[in-house]
Each structure stands twice: as structure tokens, then as C-alpha cells.
């Protein structure tokens, strides 16, 4: 259990650092970052679609009849090509997607705050405040009060930075509480 817990915190730390890096890129280089994100998403769809089309033609058994590789591949490939040719379409929905991600992460962090209360952690309220702040940022992103895409991307960058710092603080608090409560023993969190 202890190894799983340590691995999970390691994975969360990597995601937090990725959120910090992406947030910094969006904040300081919004126009370039937006185009790069759109291009990478479109390329991922093209690759995904191409792989599923290849898989469809390589498989010969009737067991694979209902995998829908051809349909998935064709739709993903066409959508990817469309987004490569029209990156502004994805740039228009990117704030909504990122806003939803920040909002979901806020809900998860809110649960962590309640878990820290149950564990008797002293600083649970900091995680709660960070969860609420992240939730507010997610809602503001979804409401999309900005008219200029680069300003919105900068605001999303601030939200991702807040998200990354908040995650790192939560990880630190959970790890500290784990060590205080269980030390080197192997007990479930």
C-alpha cells in the first residue's frame, strides 16, 4: 500500500509540474502556445485516426468486427486534418475544455480537503481555500469574460499555475499527514 501511495503521489507531482509548465507557457507566450496546443491536438487526432485505420485493415478475424476501428479512425483522421487546416476552431473551444479540466480538478481537491479533515490535519483549510480558488478560476474560464483569445489564454495560464501550485501544496500536506500518522508502517491512507 505504501508503494502505491508513493507512486500515486509521484504521478500527481508530475501532473502538477506539467500544469505549472503549461500555465507558464500560456501566460508568457499565449499566441504561440495556443497555436502549438491546437496543432499538437490535431496531430494527435491524425495519428490516432491513422493507427485505427491501419488496425482495421490488418485485422482479419470476425472477433474484431465490432471494434469500429475503421469508423473511429476515419472520424479522428478527418477531424484532425480539419483542425490542422482550421486551428482557430480548436482555439475557440480550448478555453472551455481547459476550464472544465480546472473545475474537475477543483472538485477532486475539495474532496482531498475533506479527507484531510477526516485525518485530523491541521492545515486542511489551506487545501480547501485552494480548491475554492481553483473552482472560481474554472468557472471564470468557462464564462469566458474576455474577448481577446491571447488574454484568455494568459488567464488560463494563471489558472493552470494556480492549479499546479495548489496540487503541490495538497501533495505536500497529504504526504506530511501520512508520515505523521503512519510513519514507516504500511497502513492504508
Image (spheres, rainbow, N blue to C red):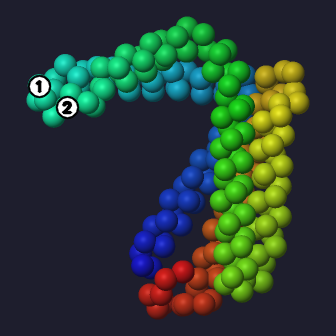
Q: Quadrant of residue 86?
A: top right
Quarter occupied by the N terminus: bottom left
Q: Residue at x 69, y 82 (%)?
A: 118
Q: Eyeballing the image, is 69 above or below 22? A: above
Q: Mark 1: which secondary structure?
A: loop
Does residue 99 appear in this view? yes
Q: Residue at x 87, y 27 (%)?
A: 146
Q: Residue at x 23, y 23 (%)?
A: 56
Q: Eyeballing the image, is 45 above or below 181? A: above
> Do the residues under discs 1 and 2 have CB atoms within 8 angstroms?
yes
User: Residue 22: where, in percent of width, then height?
Assistant: 65, 40
- Horizontal side of 66 relative to 36 (left or right) equals left
**Residue 169 got which mark?**
none
User: Residue 101: where, in percent of width, then height?
Assistant: 65, 44
* Disc 1 packing (10 Å; few <14; some 14–19; many ≥20): few
Q: Residue at x 28, y 31 (%)?
A: 67
Q: Mark 2: which secondary structure?
A: helix
Q: Number of callouts in the render?
A: 2
Does residue 27 appear in this view? no
Instruction: Calculate the distance from the C-alpha at mark 1 to the C-alpha at mark 2.
Output: 8 Å
Quarter occupied by the C terminus: bottom right
Q: Eyeballing the image, is 115 above or below 111? A: below
* Disc 2 packing (10 Å; few <14; some 14–19; many ≥20): few
Residue assigned mark 2? 64
User: Residue 34: where, in percent of width, then height?
Assistant: 67, 25
Q: Quadrant of residue 26?
A: top right
Q: Eyeballing the image, is 12 above or below 50? A: below
Q: Quadrant of residue 55?
A: top left
**Residue 60 got which mark?**
1
Amino acid at each position: 500500500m505504501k508503494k502505491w501511495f508513493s507512486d500515486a503521489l509521484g504521478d500527481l507531482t508530475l501532473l502538477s509540474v506539467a500544469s505549472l509548465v503549461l500555465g507558464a507557457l500560456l501566460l508568457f507566450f499565449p499566441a504561440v502556445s495556443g497555436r502549438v496546443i491546437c496543432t499538437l491536438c490535431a496531430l494527435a487526432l491524425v495519428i490516432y485516426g491513422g493507427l485505427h485505420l491501419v488496425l482495421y485493415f490488418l485485422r482479419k478475424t470476425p472477433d474484431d468486427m465490432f471494434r469500429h476501428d475503421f469508423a473511429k479512425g476515419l472520424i479522428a483522421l478527418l477531424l484532425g486534418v480539419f483542425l490542422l487546416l482550421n486551428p482557430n476552431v480548436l482555439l475557440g473551444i480550448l478555453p472551455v475544455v481547459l476550464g472544465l479540466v480546472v473545475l474537475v480538478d477543483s472538485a477532486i481537491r475539495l474532496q482531498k480537503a475533506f479527507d484531510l479533515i477526516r485525518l485530523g490535519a491541521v492545515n486542511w483549510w489551506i487545501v480547501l481555500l485552494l480548491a475554492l480558488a481553483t473552482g472560481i478560476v474554472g468557472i471564470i474560464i468557462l464564462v469566458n469574460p474576455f474577448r481577446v483569445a491571447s488574454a484568455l489564454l494568459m488567464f488560463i495560464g494563471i489558472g493552470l499555475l494556480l492549479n499546479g501550485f495548489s496540487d503541490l501544496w495538497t501533495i505536500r500536506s497529504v504526504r506530511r499527514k501520512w508520515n505523521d500518522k503512519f510513519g514507516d508502517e504500511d497502513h492504508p491512507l
